[in-house]
Image: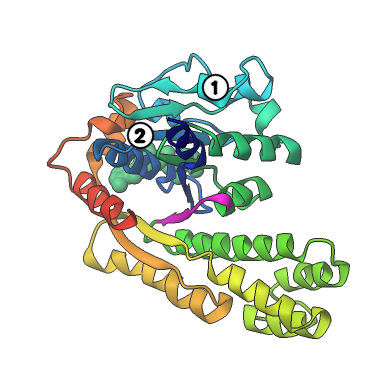
């Protein structure tokens, strides 16, 4: 009995974070469909709206006005995140709605952010799917970086591809900056290198690691390299219309390998489906997407691969 209890305490949920930089590319839609499939596969899943500036996941789930939100936890009206979870009409799928009080949560203090992450890890579930906001603010990147599965969504549009690359790049630099910790010269180097036209002529991560070795030694350089290699984003192309569209993910792979020394994996595409738009307009939960939908089948395949 005691052993069983300890085992339970030691099992943490696996976190999947869904980001991508650009707004309106389907991060929330993809988060919902992945969480839906995880639940359908019998995994106890919690979908969390971490779009702190513009929470709308509940709307896509057909909920007009959420009874409880993350804000109730941040303002301590509710003591635990577990209490903020609401059931959905899908077995094994629960939901944590984003804060409707935008002002309190749009820019949480570091301590609040750490608290949220800490409590997410303690949730009673097998999988947690984090729906992130648009952009590359530290808040978005930090939630992305704590996840075991770092999912980057893009669409085939050039602007979206650029934004997705920029998102990955910012995530890499954010991770480096965290690792550099209390070493001011290294921090300064990383900050300068963020600017692509920096005067130090650091153009790629390879250049940066070389410069880091000169400043902080080989051991530190190797540590940085290992950590960024471990980022390995999972790339998903949404709103695919023709077969060429699927190559968008390949572009992210090639550019990331060349300039960032990271090796994203390409998980394929999700078809553009008119039904999804209609469902959003009619406030029908996206989880009711019909079985015949290609997007439905694509997200099933992707969830299987991600598992
Ligand atoms: N595969 C798809 N086919 C058709 N429409 C889609 C698809 N995926 C998403 N959409 C539509 O695109 C719109 C934006 O989707 P969604 O809200 O998921 O994007 P987002 O990236 O989360 O946006 P935001 O940055 O504002 O949070 C929605 O109206 C949704 O219905
Ligand atoms: Mg969204």
- Residue 302, labelled with which disc? none
Answer with left or right where residue 304 lies relative to residue 25: left
Colour mode of the rendering: rainbow
Q: Residues within 10 Å of mark 1 (few under 14, many from 20)?
A: many
Q: Is residue 305 above or below residue 253?
A: above
Residue 289: quarter of image? top left
| Residue 161 percent across, percent down from the top left | 46, 63
| Residue 226 percent across, percent down from the top left | 59, 73
Q: Quick one: which residue is furthest to the left in this view?
A: 292
Residue pointed to by mark 1:
69
Q: Nearer the viewer, residue 120 or 17?
A: 120
Q: Earlier in the sequence, mark 2 or mark 1?
A: 2
Q: Is residue 290 above or below residue 159?
A: above
| Residue 94 percent across, percent down from the top left | 39, 27
Q: Circle 2 sits in a helix, a strand or a loop, which is it?
A: loop
- Residue 44, labelled with which disc? 2
Task: Identify the magenta region.
Answer: 146-154
Q: Circle 1 sits in a helix, a strand or a loop, which is it?
A: loop
In this rendering, does residue 239 appear at all? yes
Residue 291: quarter of image? top left
């Amino acid at each position: 009995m005691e052993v069983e209890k300890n085992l339970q305490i030691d099992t943490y949920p696996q976190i999947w974070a869904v980001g991508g930089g650009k707004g309106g590319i389907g991060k929330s839609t993809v988060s919902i469909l992945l969480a839906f499939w995880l639940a359908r596969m019998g995994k106890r899943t919690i979908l969390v709206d971490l779009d702190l500036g513009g929470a709308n996941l509940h709307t896509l789930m057909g909920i007009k006005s959420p009874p409880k939100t993350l804000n109730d936890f941040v303002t301590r009206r509710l003591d635990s995140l577990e209490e903020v979870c609401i059931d959905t009409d899908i077995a094994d799928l629960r939901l944590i709605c984003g804060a409707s009080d935008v002002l309190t949560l749009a820019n949480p203090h570091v301590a609040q952010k750490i608290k949220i992450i800490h409590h997410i890890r303690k949730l009673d579930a097998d999988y947690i799917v984090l729906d992130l906001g648009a952009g590359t603010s530290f808040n978005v990147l930090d939630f992305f970086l704590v996840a075991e599965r770092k999912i980057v969504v893009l669409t085939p549009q050039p602007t979206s591809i650029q934004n997705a690359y920029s998102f990955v790049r910012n995530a890499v630099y954010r991770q480096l900056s965290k690792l550099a910790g209390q070493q001011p010269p290294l921090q300064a180097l990383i900050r300068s290198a963020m600017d692509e036209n920096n005067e130090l002529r650091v153009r790629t991560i390879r250049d940066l690691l070389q410069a880091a070795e000169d400043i902080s030694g080989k051991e530190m350089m190797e540590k940085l390299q290992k950590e960024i290699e471990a980022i390995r984003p999972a790339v998903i192309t949404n709103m695919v219309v023709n077969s060429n569209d699927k190559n968008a993910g390949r572009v992210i792979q090639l550019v990331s390998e060349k300039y960032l020394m990271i090796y994203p994996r390409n998980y394929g595409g999700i078809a553009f489906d008119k039904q999804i738009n209609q469902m959003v307009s009619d406030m029908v939960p996206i989880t009711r997407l019909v079985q015949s939908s290609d997007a439905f089948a694509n997200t099933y395949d992707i969830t299987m691969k991600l598992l």
